[in-house]
Image: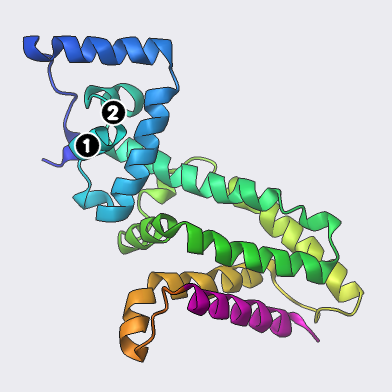
Amino acid sequence: MAEADLPAPAQNPKAGTVRAAGKKESRKNPGTSRELLLAAARREFARRGFEGARVDEIAKRAGVNKQLVYHHFGNKEALYRLVLESVYTEIREQEKRLDLSNLDPEQALRRLIEFSFDYLAANRDFVALLTDENLHKGRRLKQVANLQPLHSPLIEILGQTLARGTQGGLFRPGLDPMQVYISIAGLGFFYFNNIHTLSAIFGRKFEDKTEIAARRAHVVDLMLHALRP
């Protein structure tokens, strides 16, 4: 039986004191243990994937009792889905703050390209989570509610920005904003997802800051030239 299917462990006399303390903490600071568990789960799922991650280890990383995992999330699979939802929500919220609509079209695209690359550079766990979920054909991500509406505003704003750039003669006509975004994300994602194998193949230390900066400059230059007439 998979760990995700296991019910919450039955209480026993020895654990009574610990669990009572956990419940007391939850009542006093209702968001604290939940947030700690989400952060710990994000690290553990990124490190070991869904199959390899253990609820015991997530609770240990969070510094809370295992029972609180079941109290807050129900089971391991529900926790994993919430982690996926939270990482996508995080990046979409940060993209909103780029304020692309109020920038010159080319400046807006430059800012989006730089942000996408920098986000992946700073959040390797995001890369690992998406890689693992793709190995499972996105099965659990498909179960996340409101996933598509979460992404729609970005594509809409990007489409408007591309249209403004086309009207001003900065970008070529007929650009699909969804395809443009996938290209922007893909150029950074491939690099960080394959950074160790690329380093081995080419005998370069692609983890070094100078190599990452060189790749960033290349991605920005490549994408902007691809959009121009």
Q: Are marks 2 and 1 in contact (CB under 8 Å)?
A: yes
Left or right for 197, reference 65: right
Q: Quadrant of residue 136?
A: bottom left
Q: Residue at 18% of width from left, 35% of height from top?
A: 56
Which is more toward the observer, 209 or 40?
A: 209
Against 124, residue 198 (above or below) is: below
Mark 2 to mark 1 CA distance (whole Å): 7 Å
Q: SS at mark 2? A: helix
How dense is the environment of label 1, judged by Cα within 10 Å: few (below 14), some, or many (20 and up)? many
Q: Quadrant of the C terminus?
A: bottom right
Magenta span dominant secondary structure: helix
Left or right for 181, reference 103: left
Residue placed under numbered mark 1 in the picture = 55
Residue 69: assigned label: 2
Q: SS at mark 1? A: helix
Tell which circle, 2 or 1, labels the residue nearer the N-terminal end.
Answer: 1
Q: Quick check: can you spot residue 25?
A: yes
Residue 219 among those drawn in magenta? yes
The stretch in magenta equals: 209-229
